[in-house]
Image: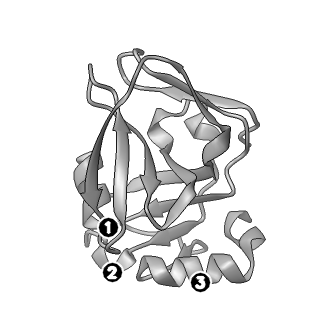
Amino acid sequence: MLSAPFEGGCQCGAVRYRSAALPFVCYTCHCRACQRITASAFATCVQVPAEGLEILSGSPGAFTRTADSGNILTTSICKQCGSALFVANSSRPRTRTIYVGTLDGASEVAVNAHIWVSRRLPWVILPEKHRIFQEAGDFRSDYASDPSRLNRE
């Protein structure tokens, strides 16, 4: 189980960050934007309060893109190695979405929800007991009704 504070960084080590707060949600996103940014089938993410995320070293660059939801996402990246680190979403300005692969303790993250499954690549097999959401809006609605449910194993 991930404990706070926790740290992470880019592939080359030029950018390091720390979150003072535990993630309030952990999920895997199968949207096309996440597939492209990770150059993989999906992105696994945790969300934390923006005010608790601190850059320890380096100076990340940023680029902006439009997600499948229509939200504007600003992704912080390492200017040296290109690693995508975390994202600011226009619909949730007080939240940062951290890519789990950049966490020092990535193996400590327990994911049990999948979003944008309507865009999942056909060969990706989802675990039977995980929560499945065809679109991101379904996920947000469920989370808003009972935030504690999303991180239960």
- In the image, residue 120 lies at what x, y percent? 31, 71
Q: Residue at coordinates 67% horizontally, 78% vertically from top-left? A: 144
Q: Please determine whether, in this image, residue 123 is positioned above or below residue 48.
A: below
Query: Alpha carbon of mark 2 to alpha carbon of mark 1: how far?
Result: 8 Å
Which of the image's four quarters has the N terminus? top right
Marks 2,1: beta carbons within 8 A: no
Q: Which amino acid, mark 2?
A: Ser
- In the image, residue 56 lies at what x, y percent? 56, 19
Q: Which mark is residue 118?
A: 2
Frontmost residue, 129 versus 147 = 147
- In the image, residue 55 lies at what x, y percent? 54, 26
Badge 1 or badge 3: first in the primary sequence: 1
Badge 2 or badge 1: first in the primary sequence: 1
Residue position for label 1 = 31
Marks 2,3: beta carbons within 8 A: no
Q: Which amino acid, mark 1?
A: Cys
Q: Secondary structure at mark 1?
A: loop
Q: Residue at coordinates 45% horizontally, 38% vertically from top-left? A: 101
Is 57 placed left or right of 75 in the picture?
right
Query: Alpha carbon of mark 2 to alpha carbon of mark 3: how far?
Result: 17 Å
Which of the image's four quarters has the C terminus? bottom right
Q: Which amino acid, mark 3?
A: Ser
Query: Alpha carbon of mark 1 to alpha carbon of mark 3: how far?
Result: 18 Å
Residue position for label 3 = 141
- Colour scheme used in the picture? one colour
Q: Residue at coordinates 25% horizontally, 56% vertically from top-left? A: 65
Q: Secondary structure at mark 2?
A: helix
Q: Residue at coordinates 51% horizontally, 84% vertically from top-left? A: 138
